[in-house]
Image (spheres, grey):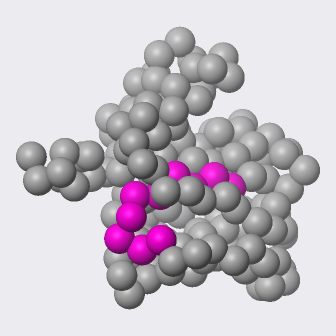
Amino acid sequence: MDDNNFMSQRHPVQNERMMLVTTNTKNREKIFIDPVYAYIALESIYRTQERQPFFLYGFVIMPDHCHLLIRVPEEGAISRVMYAYKRSVSFELGKGPIWQPRFHSKIAENPSGALHYIHWNPVKAKLCEMPENYPWSSAYGKWDVMELEWIYGI
């Protein structure tokens, strides 16, 4: 695996800001249609969080991409988080390079709207009828994420 491929996109400093992050599989291959692979991608979020701390507010593992709603602490870096995440998934799957070299991140000016977008992604793709029915999403209710209200002091 070429480590430089994961770091090829430079991102402005976005620490302490809520970010919507998207990363795609190489050639948009539907790797995560396999439930075992989807579970590995999901668990890798938490393994990455232990090594590169960030606050996780929501996520979805789609067949060919992932969305994360996160906030990276001041001492962290989104590029290090995504490098560690993509490397972890690739290693655990043992499939070689599975990701496009870049990822997209943008400030989530409306975190509730970003979370809604993430959660409704599998419905829009006709993978389920309601967000809470999709097991590879924070909408499912089984996975540990921070409540959005936490950031607003409610």
Q: Is residue 4 above or below residue 17?
A: below
Which residue is painted at 9% across and 46% down in the image?
Answer: 154
Where does residue 124 sit, x and y in percent of width and height?
Answer: 63, 20
| In the foreground, 81 or 9 | 9
Can residue 21 be seen in this snapshot?
A: yes
Q: Is residue 4 magenta?
A: no
Q: Is residue 132 above or below residue 74?
A: above
Magenta region, main secondary structure: strand
Can residue 54 be seen in this snapshot?
A: no
Name the image quarter holding residue 54. Answer: bottom left
Which residue is painted at 35% across and 70% down in the image?
Answer: 16
Where does residue 65 sit, x and y in percent of width and height?
Answer: 70, 46
Which residue is painted at 85% across and 45% down in the image?
Answer: 29
Where does residue 58 sit, x and y in percent of width and height?
Answer: 41, 46
Q: Is residue 15 magenta?
A: yes
Which residue is painted at 53% across and 42% down in the image?
Answer: 60
Magenta residues span 14-23
Q: Is residue 76 above or below residue 150?
A: below
The mark tally for this picture is 0
